[in-house]
Amino acid sequence: MVSLRAEVRKKLWANAGNRCAFPGCVQRLVSDLGMPDQPTSGAGAVVGEEAHIRSSKATGPRHDPGYPAGKLNEYENLVLLCPTHHTIVDKDGGSAWPLVEVLKIKAAHEERVDALLSDSSNQSPTTTALESRIHRWEELINLAGWEELTQRLNFVHPYLALSDWQSLAETAIWLAGVDWPPHFPKLAVAFATHRAVLEVLISHISDAFVRGQGELEIRRRHKETYFDGPDGEQLYTEAISEFGVNDAVTGVLVLELTRTVNLVILAVRDEVLPLYRFNDGLIQMVEGDLIWGLWSSHPSFDPLDWGRFPREYDLEDIKSRVTDDLHGGDPRNGRTMDVWSFDPSTQADAGTEH
């Protein structure tokens, strides 16, 4: 860190809200080293960097020979960034991030922090109503339990608790009756896309899962009976292939649904609450098992092009394309599918990237 007066440093960190000012970055600047998106703990450290907007060096990024030397280490010439984005804005002499742009991102970030922390009485009635509605969605779909839900559905034999099933079904019913104000276009298309995936996932679970002891689990017909007789081998192949396809479709839809949850989060930040989920960040999806290990990710639409939403989904189309990718679905044929590169929407042919 540079040498700054205490009052300058306090003002810079307070106005930045412990977050990187770079657009879209939610990196904590004082965080847990083991889990950087979590609050500081015993392994905490300061990772934020007090970056100069105008360099003091003639060869440095955004050097301004007319700027008073006595102001170089003052608040007005500093922006708080994470190490990655400090490097980006200063790379190649700051050619990609000229002075006016860096000043803009600092001002916009501090405005977002201030808006979130301001008294709620300053919010418009519409914003207050939308905030309440978004909270209702969080409760219905049990956003707090998303990691557990995705871990179950990404298990080697996908399953879900009956309470999970009820949460998904109730959310779909609720969303079907909700209209979003037209002057919140990102929110409207994000929830429309989220609802579309959710309804397809519910339909898939209804078709491909059976009720077990207190839970729903993917059906495995190839384990239910002994296939004998002249058609036994063919019937077994059909049954295990059915499982292979349904298992892959589940993985595709869980990933896509998590993407739409994070799409909703970004829409809320852009149009309603600038620092929505300020302390929590994007939603995580969990994969793996206790034997081979668990890992998490934050699936999102990348690149994010709001003009390509809402997106539509068709279960039969998804199953057909998954079946083709798996050469029928029989796991014994050695074919696997990269669910991260598979676009399940009906826009897949348009080449949307993930």
Image: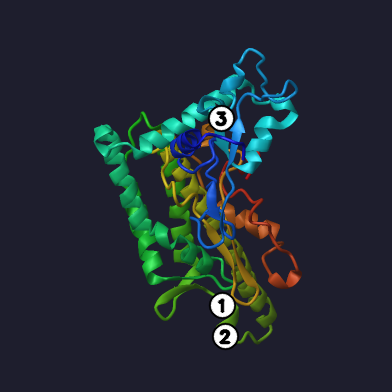
Residue type at mark 1 is Arg
x and y percentages locating residue 344 in the rendered image: 58, 50
Query: Mark 1 = which residue?
Result: 221
Q: Is residue 337 above or below residue 56?
A: below
Left/right placement of residue 135 relative to residue 283 reads: left
Q: Residues within 10 Å of mark 1 (few under 14, many from 20)?
A: some
Left/right placement of residue 313 relative to residue 124 reads: right
Look at the image and tell me whether residue 272 can be seen: no
Query: Mark 2 = which residue?
Result: 225
In three-dimensional space, the C-alpha distance between marks 3 and 1, rounded to whole angstroms, equals: 64 Å
Residue type at mark 3 is Leu
Left/right placement of residue 107 relative to residue 51 reads: left
**Which callout, 2 or 3, points to the residue nearer the camera?**
3
Q: Mark 1 falls on what kind of element?
A: helix
* Label drawn at residue 315: none
Q: Is residue 353 above or below residue 97?
A: below
x and y percentages locating residue 178 in the rendered image: 31, 43
In three-dimensional space, the C-alpha distance between marks 1 and 2, rounded to whole angstroms, equals: 7 Å
Q: Residue furthest top?
A: 66
* Label drawn at residue 78: 3
Q: Mark 2 falls on what kind of element?
A: loop
Q: Quadrant of the C terminus?
A: top right
Q: Quadrant of the N terminus?
A: top right
* Mark 1 in CB contact with mark 2 (< 8 angstroms): yes
Between residue 267 and residue 182, name the one nearer to us: 267
Q: Mark 3 falls on what kind of element?
A: strand
